[in-house]
Image (tube, rainbow, N blue to C red):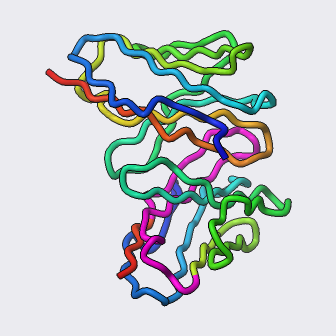
Amino acid sequence: RKEVEQDPGPFNVPEGATVAFNCTYSNSASQSFFWYRQDCRKEPKLLMSVYSSGNEDGRFTAQLNRASQYISLLIRDSKLSDSATYLCVANQAGTALIFGKGTTLSVSS
Amino acid sequence: GAGVSQSPSNKVTEKGKDVELRCDPISGHTALYWYRQSLGQGLEFLIYFQGNSAPDKSGLPSDRFSAERTGGSVSTLTIQRTQQEDSAVYLCASSLQESGEAFFGQGTRLTVV
């Protein structure tokens, strides 16, 4: 099952950089979209939901393009603490959450 | 507890033995998921329970794997006749019905020797 595709990276950026990740999904019936963050050897945790009109949470901006079936995550002013793997989810209600394999971000000083 | 609880946190077993992994979801969450993650890999979906509906077992890799959820709460994932390739972290998550926001336990690290 390859319902969600992500560029695995790694993305290596300096502190203060802006970085963007894309995630494509194949199920056009998907209704809910999320970005999760997973630190090394830890469990995934919800970073933010993705709304149709796009949404922002501090330095993080998520956008949805239904026509092209992709979601994006933009991180501005990257911090060392942003280093992690970012997982996207595109979900059809009532079905299992299928995660992308994740994009690894490494922020260096 | 407030979060998803999994036990044991670590399990070392001999090849060919059966193992049971337990997940206590957040109270009131009707959806429960099991995933497997090998080192450096993504989350592999195993099985999904939603309320009283028949579980989605489409991710189970073989008939050695089974799971049940009793009383709509606690879930047990059983692996029979374990193989070395079963070694991974097994993650459980729960969510409110159809909300999609899943909360994960800390996982069970299974090592088959």
Q: Quadrant of residue A29?
A: top right
Please name the residue shown 39% across and 79% down the image.
B112
- What residue span does the magenta drawing correspond to? B80-107
**Image spot of residue B60 (x, y percent):** 66, 65
Instruction: Give the residue at the far right of this rendering.
Output: B53
Residue at (25%, 11%) from the top-left corner?
Answer: A16
Q: A28 or B100, which is in the foreground?
A: A28
Which of the pair B4/A36 is nearer the observer?
A36
Percent x, y of residue A36: 50, 35
Residue B40, percent from left and from top? 37, 50
Q: Is residue B93 magenta?
A: yes
The residue lying toward the viewer, choosing from A80 and A70, is A70
Above or below: residue A64 compared with residue A24: above
Task: Count the numbered circles shown.
Answer: 0
Residue A46 picture location, percent across and down = 51, 36
| Residue B99 quadrant | top right
Query: Looking at the image, is B19 positioned above or below residue B2?
Result: below
With B62 as the anchor, is A67 left or right in this view? right
Q: Quadrant of residue A69?
A: top right
Q: What residue lies at 49% left-to-right and 14% top-to-bottom? A: A61
On-image quarter of the C terminus of chain A: top left
Image position of A91 with respect to B103: above or below:
above
In the picture, measured across the screen, residue B28 lies left or right of residue A46, that is right
Residue at 45% x, 15% y: name it: A74
Q: Is residue A24 above or below residue B65?
A: above
- Kindly give the residue lying farthest to the left in the view shown: A109
Q: Is residue B34 magenta?
A: no
